[in-house]
């Protein structure tokens, strides 16, 4: 498994490495979620955290917005969910010391205002 990705950001190249202390935080957060089994073994969405695209926007090549706390990331995810009418979730970045928000292709849910928790979302998918 290749843990180093070379990406071009702006005018220079950077090597991004997974920070293993962040892996421990990320993994602990993932297994607390009600849908952890589905995320790891059925949809396999949790494994996307190991991709450099979890830290870099694949369309622009720029780093994603970094949130310093879980609370600020949750608040931003809720705000984006309401704004875009799709489920956004927060996650600990393995490459930096912050949190990011994102969605995957499976999380496009119409009528998001009726959805109140991850558990309800997993039942609909």
Image (cartoon, rainbow, N blue to C red):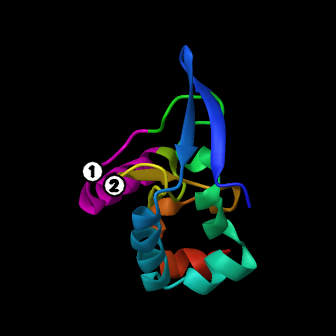
Pointer 1 residue: 68
Lateral position of residue 71 relative to residue 101, left or right? left
First to last magenta residue range = 65-83
Q: Is residue 8 left or right of residue 102?
A: right
Mark 1 nearby-residue class (10 Å; few <14, some 14–19, many ≥20): few
Q: Which of the two residues, 49 or 123, is positioned nearer the viewer here?
A: 49
Vertical comparison of 55 with 117: above or below: above
Left-right relation of 8 to 113? right
Image quarter (top left, top right, bottom left or bottom right) of the N terminus: bottom right
Residue 112 lies in the magenta-colored region:
no
Is residue 121 in view? yes
Position of residue 78 measured from the top left corner of the image (x, y, whole percent): 37, 57
Mark 1, secondary structure of its residue:
loop
Report the residue marked by disc 2: 73
Q: Is residue 125 above or below residue 50?
A: below
Q: Position of residue 94 (x, y in %)?
A: 49, 57
Q: Nearer the viewer, residue 13 or 40?
A: 13
Residue at figure coordinates x 46%, y 81% from the top left = 33
Residue at 50% across, 82% down: 119
Q: Residues within 10 Å of mark 2 (few under 14, many from 20)?
A: many
- Looking at the image, which residue is at 26% across and 57% down? 69
Query: In which quadrant of the rendered image does the C terminus lie?
Result: bottom right
| Residue 44 located left or right of residue 21 | right
Total label count?
2
Residues marked 2 and 1 touching at CB (< 8 Å)? no
**Which is closer to the viewer, label 2 or label 1?**
1
Task: Find the distance from the CA under tag 2 to the CA under tag 1.
Answer: 8 Å
Q: Residue furthest top?
A: 11
Residue at left 32%, top 48%?
Answer: 67
Under circle 2, the secondary element is: helix
């Amino acid at each position: 498994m290749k843990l180093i990705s070379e990406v071009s950001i702006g005018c220079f190249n950077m090597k991004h490495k997974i920070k293993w202390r962040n892996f421990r935080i990320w993994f602990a957060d993932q297994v607390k979620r009600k849908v952890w089994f589905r995320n790891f073994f059925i949809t396999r969405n949790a494994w996307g955290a190991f991709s450099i695209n979890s830290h870099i926007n694949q369309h622009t090549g720029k780093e994603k917005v970094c949130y310093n706390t879980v609370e600020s990331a949750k608040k931003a995810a809720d705000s984006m969910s309401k704004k875009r009418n799709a489920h956004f979730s927060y996650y600990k970045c393995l490459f930096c010391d912050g949190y990011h928000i994102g969605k995957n292709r499976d999380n496009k849910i119409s009528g998001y205002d009726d959805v109140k928790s991850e558990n309800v979302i997993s039942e609909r998918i």
